[in-house]
Image (cartoon, coloured by chain):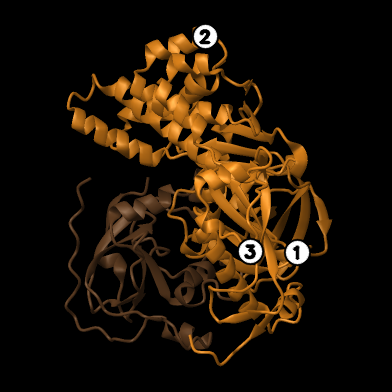
Amino acid sequence: MAKSPMKVASTEKVEKSLKYQELIDKQKLTECPKNCKESELEAYRWVLTPLDNENNFLPVMQYSQKNNRPMRRLTSDDGRCAGCAGLSMFDSLENARNRFAGFEKKIQTLLGYTHVAAGQITKDMGIVSEISPDSGHFALYEYKNVDLRTTFTIASTIF
Amino acid sequence: MEAINGHMIGSLPIKNLKKVSDLLEYEGPILSHFTGDKNNNYLFYWTDFDNKHNRWLVWKVSKYQLYQYLTGLISLRDMVNEGNKDYVYSVDIDDELNYTNVNAILLDEIPEAYLPEEDSVFKFPVPTVYQDLVNTFEESSHLALLRSIALYFTMEPTNLKHGRAVPAIDAGDFLKKLSSSFLSFVETDFIKRFKGLVPDFETLQRTAEQFKEALTPRIAYTTFGSFKVGISTDIIYPVESDKYSAWQREILFEYQKEVVDVNYSDEGQLREIALKYDEHSRKKIFGPYLDIINDTDYTLKVTNINRSFKRSYGRVTKQKQQIILPKKQIEEAQTEKRKLYSVILEAREGEDFTKISKKQFQEGLLFAPEPVDKVIVTLHDLRYGFPPLELLHPISYTLALVNNFYIAESTEFGINVTALTKEEVHEAFQKRFAETFMNIRDDEDSPLRRAYMEAVRFYPNAAG
């Protein structure tokens, strides 16, 4: 499938502190995020259309609070760091779609995503966790003033 | 959320829940594996949500089910529906991990919307934390496959003086002969079937050798008393390409048909074998098998796993054996076995029997030598082994000769050693005696210690 052209990130100087640092501090998370570094790579994220839907590119805690939904948590560790400040991403369109395809339809419906958006992560945008060698999944912790809705584009439907 | 038709209970009746791993997750768990009391395993499966709670189905699973799910053998739906439980639980959990609305639901009362779908199989790499579990069950399921196709051989002693217990050395001899017969069959049958397909004979032989390695008979089952052993072979392990896989799957059955399921007393069947296989192949395939059948110390029965196939054998006369085996091989097989004999000899007092002549031996013989199962050997001193030990009184062991192997045994000193010659077995016994003494001399709980302490004196400072 042909990829959509990616938007190039703005060269405007950004402040290099994490967008959700206050939430991290509020939860007293001392090692969050862990083992992350600035990087330049193509990234793919599950989204809703239109891309400027205000629920896209929100960490799950923000999304839950904003939409009056509970977070999926079974232990106190679930969703603590990535949940409040990280965005799930994949390193390829194929990996992004495969992960979604691995869930049965009922779960896909509960998750609600319909498309995959693609974009270029630059060092000005934030820090990324290690990429899972099995799934290509990683988390992006955005810097302040970064708005991925303006730099990502819809690459494909999610199915 | 869906209405639950269940029995409301105050709390989830599972204590000490500890998460092992998320099996499915995306920005939070979707399917998670927990352990609880008594190391039982539970799954939490996300089914629904409202503005305060996520709803989870919770049920007990076995490790085997987990293995089957993780390796794609069963679906999540199969795991829920597995009838090893009466109930599954549904529980609503909020952001703060408070559990409410806990229900026990009968399996057939689970709302369809909450049941995993038919194709809810695990489609991701097995998480590292489950690798040991998978390896364990991979081995046992491989064993189950081997058992399902195995041929079960039962050796029963004709003389029940020692009960039905079969000496290990005889069992070993049986396995060796059977393996040799089967592998020769593999080679012969492979070459016969594929010589048209692989014109280069060297390549054909090389592949046959690879199959002999891959198809080496494996013990899939054993019981003792009578010696019953399930012999199988790896019908899945691929060699070169899958063009041979149909042959590979059938090879043990072919062996059963061609070699095991034969009435060796029926001349007609023997002549068919003689026509079908050349002399070399008959010698290699049927020679060891006839040796097993004709061992007068045992009777042999063979079955498959569900006993739809049964075969037992009578002795095969020399005349009938000659239909399929060269005369020389039959004679070799019949003169091979050595036995111990008890001899009463008249001789001069103080005779050095190591130097006695054949004539003196024949003239001194008072009675015809009698075969014996074992003899008592007495040791007056220990020549082998370290540390040097001095015997305080003579000790003895029984010496047996079974299938040309010497076995020295002493229950008093807990020793059983085997060797090819009487000199080797004599030396091995003494070395084992010294080793055992060193191991147990400070072990006051050892039941053997007293016998050793009363039999020997030890010089700890002696030079090696």
Residue B439 point in image, percent of width and height: 63, 78
Q: Disc 1 residue type?
A: Ile
Residue B158: in sight, yes or no? yes
Are the residues flagged by discs 3 and 2 in contact, CB closer than 8 Å? no
Mark 1 Cα-neighbour bin, 10 Å: few <14, some 14–19, many ≥20: few
Mark 3–mark 2 Cα distance, whole angstroms, equals 66 Å
Helix, strand or loop status at disc 2: helix
Mark 1–mark 3 Cα distance, whole angstroms, equals 10 Å
Letter of the chain that mark 2 sits on in the rendering: B
Q: Is residue B323 above or below residue B361?
A: above
Chain that is orange in the image: B
Side (left or right) of B295 relative to B207: right
Question: Which residue is at the front of the view, A155 or B128?
Answer: B128
Which mark, residue B14? 1
Residue B247: name its quadrant.
top left
Chain that is brown in the image: A
Q: Which residue is mark 3?
A: B34
Question: Which residue is at the front of the view, B240 or B165?
Answer: B165
Letter of the chain that mark 1 sits on in the rendering: B
Q: Which residue is mark 2?
A: B267
Residue A44 point in image, percent of width and height: 30, 60
Q: Disc 3 residue type?
A: Phe
Letter of the chain that mark 3 sits on in the rendering: B
Q: Quadrant of the C terminus of chain A?
A: top left
